[in-house]
Structures are given as structure tokens and as C-alpha cells.
Image (spheres, rainbow, N blue to C red):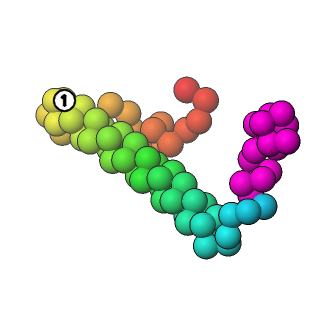
């Protein structure tokens, strides 16, 4: 039945048979991965900003007020 039910039936069967600690582990692991990727992207963005500022002799590309505005 599982082979003819498709992917949805397989996922459903896995969720039914998996214990709570396994499900918690997957959820926690995926949340940790998302956090890790987000922090890494922020660090890379800040390093790029600092590199640009250093190349310009310590002068930022935009004034702080303009850097915060959306829509540009």
C-alpha cells in the first residue's frame, strides 16, 4: 500500500511511526540550520560593508539616515 500511495502516503506513514523525540530532533535541527545560515549571511553582509568603508578611507557610502530608508 505504501508503494502505491505515493510520496504523501510515505511521509504520512513516517510521521505516524516516528517517535516524538525524533520529530523534535528534526525540527530542532532544521531551526538550528536556519539560524546558522541567517547569522552567516548577516556576518558576510557586515564584512562587505566594512570592506567598502575601509576602501573609501572610512567614509560610509550613505549617510546613516539614508541607509535605513526602504525603497531605494
Residue 23: % across, % down: 64, 64
Q: Is residue 7 above or below residue 29?
A: above
Q: Is residue 4 magenta?
A: yes
Depth check: 61 or 47 in front?
47
Q: Secondary structure at mark 1?
A: loop
Residue 71: % across, % down: 61, 29
Depth check: 20 or 13 in front?
13
Residue 36: % across, % down: 42, 53
Q: Which residues are magenta?
A: 1-15
Residue 63: % across, % down: 39, 38
Residue identified by numbered label 1: 56
Does 8 sit left or right of 41 as displayed?
right
Q: Is residue 65 above or below residue 19?
A: above
What residue lies at 60% left-to-right and 66% top-to-bottom?
22
Does 1 sit left or right of 68 as displayed?
right
Report crowding for label 1: few under 14, some 14 to 19, many 20 or more residues within 10 A (C-alpha). Answer: few
Secondary structure mostly seen in the magenta stretch: helix
Amino acid at each position: 500500500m505504501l508503494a502505491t500511495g505515493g510520496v504523501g502516503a510515505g511521509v504520512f506513514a513516517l510521521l505516524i511511526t516516528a517517535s516524538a523525540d525524533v520529530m523534535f530532533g528534526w525540527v530542532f535541527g532544521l531551526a538550528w540550520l536556519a539560524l546558522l545560515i541567517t547569522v552567516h549571511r548577516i556576518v558576510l553582509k557586515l564584512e562587505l560593508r566594512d570592506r567598502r568603508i575601509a576602501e573609501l578611507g572610512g567614509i560610509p557610502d550613505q549617510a546613516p539616515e539614508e541607509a535605513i530608508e526602504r525603497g531605494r
